[in-house]
Image (tube, rainbow, N blue to C red):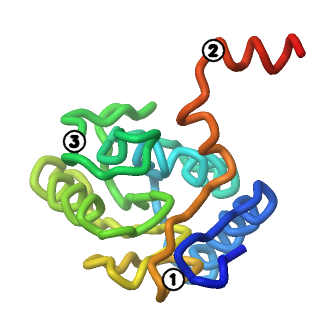
């Protein structure tokens, strides 16, 4: 649900999963065949996992991080892992790169540049996200929602960014 001021988008678990299913439909209807899904951890892990199941393709993971401060609400320096975790040796062939959103677009741009530089075995690379913000400098190949007001997206699992084990103990002992 988008707030009236357009500055916040609140997404329920059902809405989140519906967006992933719509993304799968967009990819399927494009007719593009791919060999592996590479998700960006953390935001792309949930969509990547579901797409991996739906398309029955192996899931590789590359860790990136920029939103670490203030419970994940303040962007810091971008860190990109030097290695990819994949069940089939080195990543190769046609790869679908998955993240949750193109916010500024800088992460996706930097990751794609790194992939093209370090992984010559990738023959084709396409990208897929749930949301694209208007301010993004990068436009993915596949997306579900375009957000012209650039809202802060409140995803259904973000409460865990500030929750600690002691709080879970309190919750379940209540």
Residue lying furthest left: 117
**In the foreground, 54 or 94:** 54
Which circle, 1 or 2, is nearer the viewer?
2
**Residue on which disc 1 sits:** 147
- In the picture, the quarter occupied by the N terminus is bottom right
Q: Earlier in the sequence, mark 1 or mark 2?
A: 1
Which circle, 2 or 3, is nearer the viewer?
2
Q: Residue at x 59, y 78 (%)?
A: 144
Marks 2/3: CA distance?
A: 26 Å
Q: Is residue 117 above or below residue 89?
A: below
The secondary structure type at the circle numbered 1 is strand
Marks 1/2: CA distance?
A: 34 Å
**Is residue 60 in view?**
no
55 sits left or right of 18 in the view: left
Q: Is residue 113 above or below residue 73?
A: below
Mark 3 Cα-neighbour bin, 10 Å: few <14, some 14–19, many ≥20: few
Image location of residue 94, percent across then percent down: 37, 61
- Are the residues tagged 1 and 2 within 8 Å (C-beta)? no
């Amino acid at each position: 649900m988008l707030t009236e001021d357009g500055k916040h988008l609140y997404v329920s678990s059902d809405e989140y999963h519906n967006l992933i299913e719509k993304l799968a439909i967009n990819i399927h209807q494009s007719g593009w065949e791919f060999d592996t899904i590479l998700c960006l951890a953390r935001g792309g892990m949930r969509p990547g996992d579901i797409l991996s199941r739906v398309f029955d393709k192996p899931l590789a993971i590359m860790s990136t991080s920029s939103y670490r401060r203030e419970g994940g609400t303040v962007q810091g320096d971008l860190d990109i892992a030097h290695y990819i975790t994949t069940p089939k040796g080195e990543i190769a062939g046609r790869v679908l790169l998955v993240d949750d959103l193109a916010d500024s677009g800088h992460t996706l741009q930097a990751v794609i540049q790194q992939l093209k530089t370090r992984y010559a075995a990738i023959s084709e690379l396409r990208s897929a996200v749930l949301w694209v913000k208007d301010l993004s400098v990068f436009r993915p190949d596949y997306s579900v929602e375009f957000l012209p007001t650039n809202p802060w997206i409140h995803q259904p699992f973000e409460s865990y960014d500030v929750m600690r084990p002691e709080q879970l103990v309190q919750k379940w002992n209540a």
